[in-house]
Amino acid sequence: MTVAASHLLEVEDLHVEFGQGRDTASVLNGVGYHVDEGETLAVLGESGSGKSVTAQTVMGILDTPPGRITGGSVRFRGEELLGADPERRRMLRGESMAMIFQDALSALNPVYSVGFQIAEQFRFRRGMSRKDAMARAAEMLDLVRIPNAKQRVREYPHQFSGGMRQRAMIAMSLALDPELLIADEPTTALDVTVQAQIMELLDELRRERGMGLILITHDLGVVAEVADRIAVMYAGRIVEHTDAATLYAHPGHPYTRGLMDSVPRVDDVAGAALRPIPGLPPSLSAIPPGCPFHPRCAHAEDVCAAEVPLLRELGGDHQAACHFAERFVAEDPDRPTTHEVVSR
Amino acid sequence: MSEPILQVRDLVKHFPVTRGVVFRRTIGHVRAVDGVSLDLHPGETLGVVGESGCGKSTLAQVLMRLTPPTSGTATFEGQDLFAKRGADLTAWRRDMQIVLQDPYTSLNPRKTVGDVVGEPFDIHPEVAPKGDRRRRVQELLEVVGLNPEHIRRYPHQFSGGQRQRIGIARALALRPKVIVCDEPVSALDVSIQAQVLNLLSDLQREFGLAYLFIAHDLGVVRHLCDRVAVMYLGSIVETGTAEEIYTRASHPYTQALLSSVPVPDPSLRGRREAIRLEGDVPSPADPPSGCRFRTRCPKAAPVCAEDPPALEVRDGTDHPAACHFAAPPHLVRAD
Ligand SMILES: Nc1ncnc2c1ncn2[C@@H]1O[C@H](COP(=O)(O)OP(=O)(O)OP(=O)(O)O)[C@@H](O)[C@H]1O
Ligand SMILES: Nc1ncnc2c1ncn2[C@@H]1O[C@H](COP(=O)(O)OP(=O)(O)O)[C@@H](O)[C@H]1O
Ligand code: SF4
Ligand code: SF4
Ligand SMILES: [Mg+2]
Ligand SMILES: [Mg+2]
């Protein structure tokens, strides 16, 4: 047996809680995923499913307290990061892994010029002079296609449009040439025409630099256009994982199918019906026993309320955490599901 | 076709841009809505789509009489909307209601759900006599799929989707003929969004409502709307039936917008036509001359900087678009 080479990033069985006693919220309940160089892993899930908390734990920027990491492992090129020396983690942030956020305006400091904020990293991490660092910052802005980068490098965040601020954030995160970029809903606040520009830019930079990209989003359209592999999250767990083509054509988890049936598409025929998932996601301080999705699932049987379904192998790097995943994968995806049993 | 219930002509709303604290001077105007005309027919849904800041919410505010127009006219059932005063105005308010985007801030946190939904009855006691209130409110909660037992709960005890239902119940209280929906599902997760969209369709069928449905999500609009108006920088650049807009868009902006929407189907990756616009939307305080879209338009020609194109049907197209070179999609180059 050969020893598998370690992934660029590997997260395993991650557990995170917030709060105390009866109010304890189990926010992550065994999250695991991995990403390799040059590929895009999309983490797909609705709000509150734990996408950002996972990313913050990976980056080592989760607020503890109130958060508590109660188990699991985060390895970067095989090196365990949970419990690692804070100095080592600071070094890795920026140099090896970087993150961009949904709200670029609040992530940028309003009182410094955009260029100054990018240049800081070159000065403190690379020991460059102020002048050289500003010149490098302008190059970075040019790389992310900000017009007149040489002039605009001295402007302040409020002088940039939403799309330009997100470009500036990307420039800042790429300054030290990280091998892994985590983009947490990078286009959610942007208009579609600008979103399309930013997604294309990210995809190109990933390809050119051979970076691993973790794209966090709730948008099934964005995911379908760029992801190599997709991990679907629900109530702090990965409930399904596979490559993009397989996930959309043969979802094995009723929640994944439910999401797809809920999206109104521009290319739908007129009058196509939406089939929403009934009910609401659970409170994380009172996750239902057994399958956390069972109160909303049209296929639930007795076993679903009793036993937590673990991720099952469905063949060809496809896993789903549903007791009956094999059956759903085999079904014709165009056949209407029983989701019409909606409690409206 | 029936007479329009709401008819809007050349509507303009400019906001002054001022400078100075003691001596406030007006140094310009934000042309938030700049010459909008539209018709809404009884029982239909007209979608208004466009990117952030193009004037959708301002249009809604003016039509709801929440802010006065700068110029232009609007009629409701043939009567001048902006001339309504006193009892006439109060009576009209029963007929036209609004549902807002943000289910988190559009409800008063100190009022119970019963108070919020029953509030319109305070202003219009003729609709529900005092003794009948509670029953009417519970009926409304049931109509929008909420538990009538929860009448004494406060908004924070509900999820985003449920709060949006409360807003819809309040809008329905007076049995309006028209509901203006300003991004009613934008803040919701996709599984909850689908529940609320289905609810809106069901209510329309049941009560014969007309919706003026404002949204930036083109998938949502495709789903719900009979006709669509596309806005850019305060003006309507293209309008038609949903079928015309989604399958035969003839304005370069609409075409770019549609091609930018990601489709949840990996098998179409790289096979869809991609029209990528450069840059961002210009400031509505200083819009470009001629055609507003020319600074980002892949088809712009010198004439576009001179003559503002009229919103009209041109040769080879079957619905109005404000472009000198309006043409069906396949005649537009992909890059
Ligand atoms: N009270 C106001 N004073 C000055 N400018 C305003 C005011 N209200 C709106 N505007 C400006 O008018 C323009 C149109 O705004 P509006 O809110 O109607 O846009 P919108 O299409 O609803 O955008 P969104 O999709 O972001 O909701 C914007 O440039 C906005 O900044
Ligand atoms: N600092 C915090 N304190 C308490 N709860 C938190 C904190 N950060 C996140 N949470 C909770 O953790 C859960 C997952 O959050 P998050 O990872 O941000 O979700 P998302 O998938 O939307 O990114 C949510 O229920 C959220 O309320
Ligand atoms: S395990 Fe049961 S409840 Fe959970 S998704 Fe599968 S069928 Fe539904
Ligand atoms: S009029 Fe000119 S600039 Fe305007 S949309 Fe048509 S081609 Fe483009
Ligand atoms: Mg998040
Ligand atoms: Mg608005």
Image (cartoon, rainbow, N blue to C red):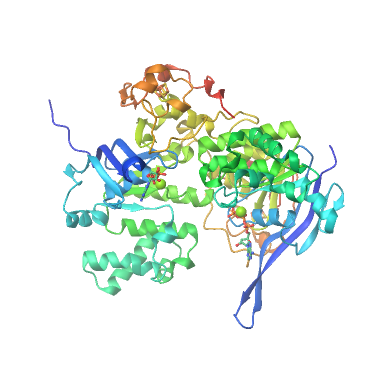
Figure quadrant of residue A47: top left
Q: Is residue B295 left or right of residue B79?
A: left
Q: Which residue, as the protein is rendered here, is positioned at the far bottom?
A: B23
Would you say residue B39 is visible in this rendering? no
In the image, residue A217 lies at what x, y percent?
Answer: 42, 43
Q: Quadrant of the N terminus of chain B?
A: top right
Q: Is residue B300 left or right of residue B41?
A: left
Between A79 and A29, the one lying in front of the other is A29
Rendered residue at 64%/83% (across/down): B23
In the image, residue B173 lies at what x, y percent?
Answer: 72, 42
Q: Is residue A202 left or right of residue B151?
A: left
Q: Which residue, as the protein is rendered here, is positioned at the far right?
A: B78
In the image, residue B325 lies at what x, y percent?
Answer: 68, 50
Answer above or below: position of B64 versus A213: below
Count the labels in the image.
Answer: 0
Rendered residue at 37%/56% (across/down): A170
Between B75 and A144, the one lying in front of the other is B75
Figure quadrant of residue A302: top left
Rendered residue at 36%/66% (across/down): A138
Figure quadrant of residue A115: bottom left
Rendered residue at 59%/37% (across/down): B196
In the image, residue B167 lies at what x, y percent?
Answer: 63, 44
Would you say residue A285 is visible in this rendering? yes
Q: Is residue A294 left or right of residue B134?
A: left
